[in-house]
């Protein structure tokens, strides 16, 4: 996917990303044998955001600024 997303699709992806677990939270204990697939899905979404000139680490503050700590790193 090398084309930029339209604004509505990009906003939908940002919103979905805020509900995804952070990669550091994905463990074999929590996700069983699916943990590797979950990590791959998270990475795919991060890559798509980056291709659309969006910093994945800044998405939380943009989508839900009232409930986002000062730093999501």
Image (spheres, rainbow, N blue to C red):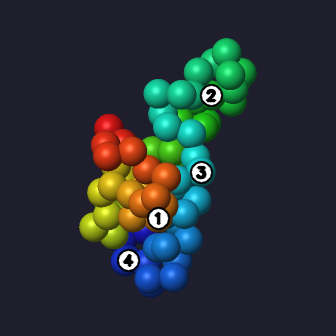
Q: Quadrant of residue 26?
A: top right
Residue 63: image tag: 1
Residue 48 seen in render: no
Residue 35: image tag: 2
- In this rendering, which labeled residue sits more in front, label 4 or label 1? 1
Find disc 4 in the rendering and name its residue: 3
Q: Residues within 10 Å of mark 4 (few under 14, many from 20)?
A: few
Q: Secondary structure at mark 1?
A: helix
In the rendered image, the vertical position of residue 21 relative to residue 14, given as above or below: above
Distance between the alpha carbons at the discs numbered 4 and 2: 29 Å
Q: Earlier in the sequence, mark 4 or mark 1?
A: 4
Distance between the alpha carbons at the discs numbered 4 and 1: 23 Å
Q: Secondary structure at mark 2?
A: helix
Q: Earlier in the sequence, mark 1 or mark 3?
A: 3
Q: Secondary structure at mark 3?
A: helix
Q: Quadrant of residue 2?
A: bottom left
Q: Earlier in the sequence, mark 4 or mark 2?
A: 4
Q: How many marks?
A: 4
Q: Residues within 10 Å of mark 2 (few under 14, many from 20)?
A: some
Image spot of residue 55 (x, y percent)? 30, 57
**What's the residue at 48%, 33% (across, down)?**
23
Q: Earlier in the sequence, mark 3 or mark 4?
A: 4
Find disc 3 in the rendering and name its residue: 19
- In this rendering, which labeled residue sits more in front, label 4 or label 2? 2
Q: Residue furthest top?
A: 29
Q: Nearer the viewer, residue 70 or 23?
A: 70
């Amino acid at each position: 996917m090398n084309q930029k997303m339209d604004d509505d699709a990009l906003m939908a992806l940002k919103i979905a990303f805020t509900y995804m677990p952070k990669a550091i939270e994905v463990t074999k204990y929590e996700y069983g044998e699916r943990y590797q697939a979950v990590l791959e899905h998270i990475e795919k979404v991060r890559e798509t955001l980056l291709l659309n000139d969006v910093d994945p680490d800044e998405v939380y503050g943009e989508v839900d600024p009232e409930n986002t700590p000062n730093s999501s790193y």
